[in-house]
Image (cartoon, helix red, strand yellow):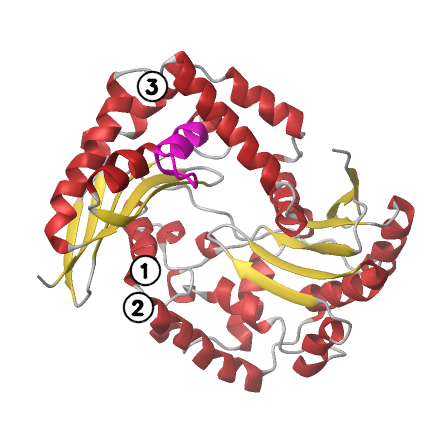
Amino acid sequence: MEFFEFQLPNGIRIVHKNIDSPIAHCGFVLNIGTRDENKDEQGIAHFIEHTIFKGTAKRKAYHILSRLDDVGGEINAFTTREDISVYASFLTEYYDRAIELLFDIIFSSTFPEKELEKEKDVVIDEINSYKDSPSESIFDEIEEIVFKNHPIGNNILGTPKIVKTFDKAKVLHFMDETFSTDEMVFTSVGKISEKKLKSIIEKYAVHIPVKHRIRKRKAVGTYKATYVEKNMDNYQTHAIIANRAYDANNEKVTALILLNNLLGGTGMNTRLNLNIREKYGFTYNLESFYTPYSDTGIFGIYLGTDNNYVEKTLKLVLREMRMLRDKPLGILQLSKAKKQLIGQMAIGQENNSNSMLSFGKALLAFGKIESYETVIEKINAVTAEDIQQVAKEIFEPSSLTTLIYRAKS
C-alpha cells in the first residue's frame, strides 16, 4: 500500500492512494466536531456540515448539488464528536471538477440567512426522528452520561431550542475560532498521477491563507459509573452497559479492538451472539462497540430485547465480561480471533470510499498512516495476557455505567 503525501504552504495536508479503478473518491477531513462547541453552540458543527452546501461566493445551493450529480457523481458529509468529513465519489475523469467544488465549499461558503432558516427546520426534523428511534438515541445518551459535563458527550445534532438560535454571525464566529488549515487533510483514492493531482490541488488552494485554531479543546473530566433507567413507550427494552476506554494513541488500543471484535463485533460467531442470542434466544439485537477519541474513548455493549428478558440478558452479558476478566484466552481461541479480525480488515479495504476517509482521519489524528502490514504485526503481537488485562480494566464492575430504556410491560 503506497501513499503519496505532501503539505501545502498554508498547512493543508494531502494524502493520495493510486488505484486502478474508474471510480475515484476524495474529500476533506476537518479537525472540528461536537467537542469544540460552547454550551450555547451545541449542534453547530453539525449545522455547518449541513449549510456549507447552501451557497458559496460563486454558486447557489442548486449549482452545488448539481455540479457532480450532473455527471453521475455524488457529494456527502457527516459530523462526529471530533471531526467533519466532506467528500465526493465520481468517475475519474472528473477529478478537477470534484476538487474545485470541494475547495469552493470548504473555503468560500457564504451561509445565506434565508437558507440557514430553512435548514434549521431540516435539522430539527432530524433530531425528532432520532427521538422516534430509541435503538439509536440510546447511543447518544450513553455518551452524555459517560462524558457528563463535557461537550464531547453532547448530542451531535444539538437541541431544537439551541438550533433555532443559529444565524450567520454564530456560524462564522465558530468557524473563525475552530477552523485551521494545519488541522485539515485532503484525502484521495483514485486513478490519477501524483503530479496531476498536485497540480489540480495547487490550482485551487494557492489563494488560501494560513489559518490557525483559536479555540483550544478542553480535557475530559473525571468519570463516575452510574445507573440510569427510564420508562419509555417502546415495544422493546433497550440497554447499554458502558465504560470509558483508551484514547486512540494508547498502546492497548489494538488489544481492546481485538477484544471488542471477539466479544460482540460484526461476526456471527461472537461470544455474545453464540452464548446469549443463539443459546437462549433472549434477544435479537446484541453487540459491543469501542470508539476511541484523541484523549479518551468509550466501550459499551448494547442490547434490545423484550422487557421480560432484559435482566436475564444483562446477567448473561456480565457473565461473559467476567469470564474474559478471570480467564485468559486459549491458544486456539486467540489465533482464531486474530485471523477473523485480519480477514475483516482485508475485506474492508475493498471499500475505497471508506479507505479514503480512514486515511484522512489517520493522518489527522496520528500524523501518519500505518501500512496494512504494520497493523497486522500489531494484531499478531497481542497476547492472551494483554487481552485479559484490558478486560480487567475496561470490564471492572465498579466502573460500568448502565442505561436502560424500559418498555411498558
Q: Going by the image, does 235 lie left or right of 353?
A: left
Measure how far apart labels 2 and 1 are at the Cα level.
6 Å
Q: Amino acid at mark 3?
A: Gln
Image point (39%, 66%), residue name: 158
Q: Which residue is mark 2?
A: 131
Question: For this rendering, which residue is in front, 17 or 142?
Answer: 17
Q: Which mark is residue 137?
A: 1
Image point (86%, 55%), residue name: 202
Q: Amino acid at mark 1?
A: Ser
Is 269 colored magenta in this rendering?
yes
Mark 3 element type: helix
**Is the stretch drawn in magenta largely helix, strand or loop?**
helix
Is 151 colored magenta in this rendering?
no
Q: Answer with mark 2 or mark 1, whichever residue precedes in sequence.
A: 2
- Establish if 136 lies above or below 349: below
Q: Position of residue 270 (x, y in %)?
A: 36, 34
